[in-house]
Image: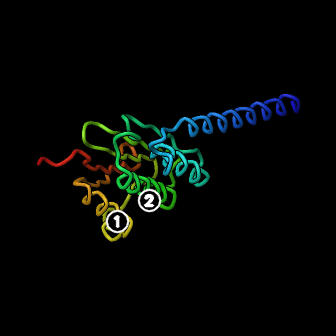
Amino acid sequence: DEASRTKLIEQVDALDAAIVEIRTAIFAITSARYAQQPSLRHRVIDIVGEMSSLFTEAPTLRFTGAVDLMIPVELGDDIAAVVREGLSNVARHAAAHLVGVTVALSGGDVTVEIIDDGVGFDPAKIARASGTKNLALRAEAWRGGFALAAREPHGTRLTWWATIAEEEQ
């Protein structure tokens, strides 16, 4: 009935307001070390948030490891660009319903993974795409790599990784 629908809409609005308050609190407790530049975590959250309207369901987002403490600002810039480019590619080409983004720090390596349940990709077209060449170049600059792989039963897995461990003296 209409009363139930109105009540449900009010509850959803209240949840949305609570999410905004939580995000505001998280921003407020960000370390002074990052006062000049938003943390990588916040930058990625913002990118996923602003791009979520391009998808039928908002992408899921997961972080593992101390990404805000261990990743240099310059590498953070590349990671943010990788997330934006990867999500743009999914939105333009995949016709995906479900999309997931993971930024993971393990040891001296950081990995960005974007998975979707879309139509997959044509390796011949990918080889010519400037966006994927850009992703590969960004990875190479950090002694890392970039790969696209098919997912079963359908979809694509973008994996981008970089090394942040200091080179041996």
- Residue at (76% x, 30% y) in the render: 11
- Residue at (38% x, 39% y) in the render: 69
Looking at the picture, how far across and down is residue 67, in whole percent?
Answer: 38, 40
> Which residue is outermost to the front?
32
Asked whether the beta carbons under mark 1 and mark 2 sit within 8 Å of each other, the answer is: yes
Mark 2 packing: few (<14 Cα in 10 Å), some, or many (20+)? some
Q: Is residue 35 left or right of residue 103?
A: right
The residue nearer to you, when weighing 116 against 136, is 136
Q: Is residue 118 left or right of residue 129?
A: right
Marks 1 and 2 sit apart, C-alpha to C-alpha, by: 9 Å
Q: Secondary structure at mark 1?
A: helix
Quarter of the image containing the N terminus?
top right
**Residue pointed to by mark 1:** 134
Q: Secondary structure at mark 2?
A: helix
The residue nearer to you, when weighing 90 against 103, is 103
The residue nearer to you, when weighing 68 against 48, is 68
Q: Is residue 143 left or right of residue 24?
A: left
**Residue pointed to by mark 2:** 85
Q: What number is the disc on residue 52? A: none
Q: Earlier in the sequence, mark 1 or mark 2?
A: 2
Looking at the picture, how far across and down is residue 76, in whole percent?
Answer: 39, 51
Residue 103 sits in quarter: top left
Mark 1 packing: few (<14 Cα in 10 Å), some, or many (20+)? some
- Residue at (32% x, 51% y) in the render: 160
> Which residue is outermost to the left?
169
Asked if residue 49 is positioned above or below residue 126 in the image, the reply reads: above
